[in-house]
Image (tube, rainbow, N blue to C red):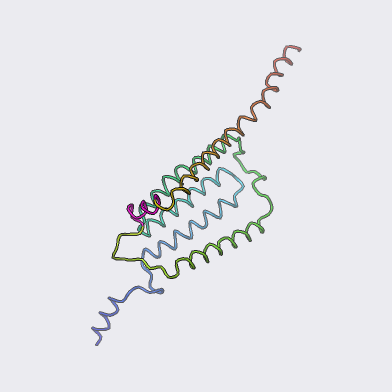
Amino acid sequence: MSGILAQGALTAPHGFLSPTGVEIAFVLVGIATLAAAVMTVTTQQLVHAALWLVVALGGLAVEYLLLTAEFIAWVQVLIYVGSIVVLLLFGLMLTKAPIGRSPDADSGNRWAALTVAVAAAGTLVWVVVDAFRTSWIDLDGPAQGSTKVSGEILFRHWVLPFEALSVLLLAALVGAIVLSRKSAPDDAPADAAAPRETESR
């Protein structure tokens, strides 16, 4: 009898109170990602915010890896960590944003922003849970995060949003260049007036 109970304990699936190592790592990485996201929106240094954003996006990539969605994880690293953050840093440099601590980075509406963030997160969770409440994943079929499945879904159903996002990023880059070039004529008269003052002296 004891042998049967021991065999049943060994073959029993992991429950909520007996998580696996992957589940523990998923929770720990999720907590670190959430902390990095909070630091991104609360720090008063723009460069530090961009670096914390790298940590948050990298944490999401690790979460995708733990969910066996390797293709989505590498897309997260290449596009978001590699491209979006670099675009943000170029925007900071081109717009001559302050490098150190800036009081302008805090609008004073933290409670309103927190309320909106909590409401948006609750709405998103409710929509996702309601949409996939009756969905089942075929574990015997191809992995849902594989390159084949993700590519078919992306280029069959999400081509237009994907291209719209690329146009949006291009517009952001062009806007940063325009803002940086508008400040150049304002500095020119001051530079031109300096030699005249020295000549009059």
In this picture, is 119 found above or below 96?
Answer: below
Query: What secondary structure is the stretch in magenta mostly built from?
Result: helix
Q: Residue 148: within the magenta?
A: yes
State which quarter of the image contains the C terminus. Answer: top right
- In the displayed image of the protein, which residue is found farthest to the bottom? 1
Queried whether the magenta region covers residue 97, the answer comes back as no
What's the residue at 47%, 51% (across, down)? 57
Figure check: 148 above or below 18: above
Q: Nearer the viewer, residue 136 or 86?
A: 136
> In this image, 11 relative to 41: left or right?
left
Write down the quadrant of residue 146 in the picture: bottom left
Residue 148: percent from left, percent from top? 32, 53
Residue 199's x, y, as percent? 73, 11
Relative to 134, say whether 191 is above or below: above
Based on the displayed image, in which of its 4 quarters is residue 78 positioned? top left
Point 69% across, 52% down: residue: 108
- In the picture provided, is 7 more to the left or to the right than 132? left
On the image, the x and y values in percent for residue 167 come to: 51, 41
* Location of residue 143 with respect to 18 vertically, above or below: above
Front position in the image: 36 or 171: 171
* Quarter occupied by the N terminus: bottom left
Q: Bounds of the magenta span?
A: 145-155
Please name the residue shown 43% across and 49% down the image.
76
How far across and how far down the image is residue 189, in percent? 70, 22
Identified at 35% across, 73% down, the residue is 14
Tell me the quarter of the picture where residue 82 sits. Answer: top left
